[in-house]
């Protein structure tokens, strides 16, 4: 009897896993940021995405942004942002987001994913609201850069950074 239950459990688990949809990030994605005195985007985003709107319990996000890809439209600002006073790209070359197991929730307006955002050697639990339409993830949220030790607390950049990500996906 125990053996039959184990086999049924494995079949059910494999069956549920088979419905998980795996995606790759398509070209023309955009991860934009803005604050009171600076804006731009990151041009190098990679990741592993498993997401099925009909079965969010199988979902997982692992997203990685390369700091060196920052683009503010100003070479000096880009260099300064990569430097030791801000992101310190030589020591902390990536921004990462890794969703928690069971970190996905369906909401009235879309979805939310909870996980750890890692920047500048600091990892914080955050929740990111997003929508998923026409195979595209859209997320708008804010991050307090001082929570991650990025830059001096009081300067003209502002503490709160707005993030606007549009990530088209292709099925693997």
Image: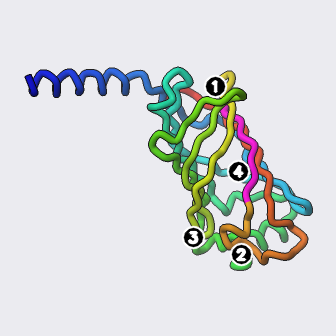
Between discs 2 and 4, the one toward the N terminus: 4
- Residue at which label 2 appears: 83
First-in-chain label (4 vs 3): 4
| N-term mark: 2 or 1 | 2
Q: Residues within 10 Å of mark 2 (few under 14, many from 20)?
A: some
Q: Local crowd at mark 1 within 10 Å, few (<14), some, or many (≥20)?
A: some
- Give the mark nearest the N terminus, 1 or 3: 3
Q: Residues within 10 Å of mark 3 (few under 14, many from 20)?
A: some
Question: Which mark, by number, is residue 43?
Answer: 4
> Toward which corner of the image does residue 70 lie, by quadrant?
bottom right
Residue 135 circle label: 1
For image coordinates 69% across by 79% down, the residue present is: 84
Question: Magenta residues?
Answer: 135-143
| Residue at image location 71% in from the left, 75% down from the top | 83
Q: In this view of the protein, which residue sits in the foreground, 79 or 117?
A: 117
Can you tell which of label 3 and label 2 is closer to the viewer?
3
Separation of marks 1 and 3 at Cα, in angstroms? 32 Å
Q: Are marks 1 and 3 in contact (CB under 8 Å)?
A: no
Question: Going by the image, does 118 lie left or right of 34?
Answer: left
Classify 10 Å Cα crowding around label 4: few (below 14), some (14-19), many (20 and above).
some
Where is residue 73 drawn, in percent x and y? 86, 58
Residue receiving disc 3 = 121
């Amino acid at each position: 009897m125990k053996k039959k239950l184990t086999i049924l459990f494995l079949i059910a688990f494999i069956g549920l896993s088979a419905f998980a949809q795996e995606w790759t990030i398509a070209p023309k994605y955009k991860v934009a940021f803005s604050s009171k005195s600076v804006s731009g985007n990151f041009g190098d985003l990679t990741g592993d995405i498993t997401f099925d709107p009909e079965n969010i319990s199988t979902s997982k996000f692992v997203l990685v942004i390369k700091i060196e890809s920052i683009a503010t439209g100003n070479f000096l600002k880009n260099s300064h942002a990569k430097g030791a006073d801000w992101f310190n790209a030589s020591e902390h070359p990536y921004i990462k987001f890794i969703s928690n197991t069971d970190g996905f929730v369906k909401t009235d307006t879309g979805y939310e994913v909870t996980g750890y955002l890692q920047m500048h050697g600091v990892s914080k639990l955050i929740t990111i609201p997003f929508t998923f339409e026409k195979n595209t993830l859209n997320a708008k949220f804010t991050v307090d850069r001082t929570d991650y030790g990025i830059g001096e607390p009081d300067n003209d950049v502002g503490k709160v950074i707005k993030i606007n990500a549009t990530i088209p996906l292709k099925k693997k």
